[in-house]
Amino acid sequence: MPDHPRVLAPGTATGEVVRLDEPLSFWGGFDPETGTLIDAHHPQAGAPLAGRVLVMPSGRGSSSSSYVFTEAIRTGTAPAAVVLAEADPIVALGAIVAEELYGVAVPVVVSPDSDLSTGEVVTVRATTDGLVTTTPTGDR
Amino acid sequence: MPGTLTLTDDDRATLEGERGEAARLAMRILTRTAEAMDAPRLLDVVSGHIDGCLYHGRAGLDFARRLAGAGARVRVPTTLNVSSLDLLHPELVRLDDRTASDARELMDAYVAMGARPTWTCAPYQLPDRPAFGEHVAWAESNAIVFVNSVIGARTGRYGDFLDICCAITGRAPEAGLHLDGERLARTVFRVDDLPEPLLRDEAGFAAIGHLVGRATGNRVPAIVGLPVSTTEDQLKALGAAAASSGAVAMFHAIGVTPEAPTLEAATGGLDATLDEVLDLAAIRRARDDLSTVTSGALVGSVSLGTPHCSAAELRRLAQLVDGRRLTIPCYVNTGRAVLAEVAEAEDALRAAGVTIVTDTCTYITPIIERADTPVVTNSGKWAWYAPGNLGFDVAFATLEECVESAVAGRLVRDREVWGDA
């Protein structure tokens, strides 16, 4: 059942796209000290995610992922934005709590048909009234 | 789109601060998350289980301090998950002083909010667990999958932070697995002709759970062909593994779990989007997927009880180690309430040299001393996460193989169980 496009957490961010082929659990799969994907079973293990626009099918696994995501936002190792094919409340929650605690807004959006590909530099704008735009940035 | 969430007068009063600043913040985070989930309303819950008491950095402490400092109190009976410390055996945990003190402050903050200091990832092993059909707000993936699947109470897949917001407000989003239709199975797995010894041990069920989780993703699976004698401990192992390799928050075991008397009842007559056979070859693949070393390899320690061992599991382990000489460290994790029930098994385990860990576990805090040598475990969850998160080599094995390996100091495989070795 395809999900519908919407904003889970508003914000604006620019970064280089990293598109994951499989879902990621922030807890156990992401190191908030280095901002790296560390899930040994993930096909893109080792990928740097800090400051990137993370595009992935969905979240996965542990309910601690919201905490790890908030902690990464606090320390500055988190992705700049998250674009999900399917809504994941645990990822959304991590961003919502970071905004409440630290006033930092990391956009988390659902965009089932996103065609963003790894290496593009884009700006994601997600507003509280549900509007998402992604625009190419840079000199290409 | 925003604005689809309808609040009661009571919810709105909380959101506007009439119950204090802590309840206002909790309700604000809850309503924002409920909107992200497309929930039309909130519903009442009868209990909470909090995962946010486990320390993963300062953000969690900042959050708990802010709530506790504003006078937050839980509105429903609430249990606490494992923490980063073993308060009964503090010498086991090798954290730096600063982290240990932050972790302790985090635990104290949740207790100050009125949550019970249960410190277990298996709250379903405690008395007073929820009843069939009741709505609860639980975090911790293995507890979520257990309460939904085995007890038939209803929780969403709640993350750290939302757990305490639900407990403070007594409310949760009316979405996901709280709803009848979302609990129906969409995928089917048929367990085919597995050797009896595999279905006698938790590891066989963890292997099934691992395969189910990998294939089903976040769809509710139905598993056909498990014995009617399947125990809660075996279902615990299955659920924990499935919730690690996939986003499984509920499964049906046909003829075993309460919402699945028949496959038809579990699917509600919907067509499955996936129908797979799990045979011995598949189970062996799961074992190998969960192991980075093979039979005969030198191993450095054994880790059991993730999720926390039940009383029955501790008694079985006590029988298996009785009179044996373990040559490498063997750790078993359990809840303090369960340990208090099994004094004689505890004595036997200690006599055999088994290290008993409570309040936390060997996965989430540094306890295992020989980090440079492979660890043998019967936990699908531990084996799945440890290579990446802890840098351990690992071997996934049955409980008996774990004990034999602890005696031999090498990974011992049982041909009778797996059909190879």
Image: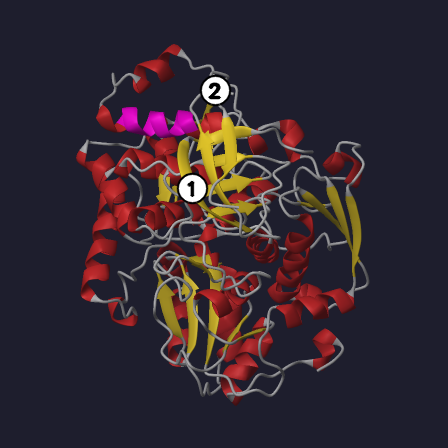
Amino acid type at circle 2 is Pro
Image disc number at residue B8:
none
| Viewer can see residue B69 | yes
- For disc 1, the marked residue is A14
Q: How many marks?
A: 2
Q: Nearer the viewer, residue A64 or B403?
A: A64
- Let me know if residue B399 is in the magenta part: no
Q: Secondary structure at mark 2?
A: loop
Q: Residue at x 45, y 32 (%)?
A: A125
Quarter placement of the C terminus of chain B: bottom right
Q: Chain ID for label 1? A: A
* Left or right of residue B100: residue A56: right
Instruction: Name above or below for residue B329 compared with residue B23.
Output: below
Judging depth in this view, the residue of B383 and B324 nearest the camera is B383
Residue B245 x %, y %: 59, 56
Q: Position of residue A43 (x, y in %)?
A: 60, 61
Where does the image place residue A27, in percent across and percent down from the top left? 44, 54
Residue stretch rendered in magenta on the structure = B23-32
Q: Position of residue B98 (x, y in %)?
A: 19, 61
Q: Residue furthest front?
A: A139
- Specify the principal SS of the magenta part: helix
Q: Chain of mark 2?
A: B
B410 lies left or right of B419: left
Q: Identify the amino acid type marked 1.
A: Thr
Residue furthest top in the image: B9
Location of mark 2 (residue) = B2
- Indicate whether B72 appears above or below B238: above
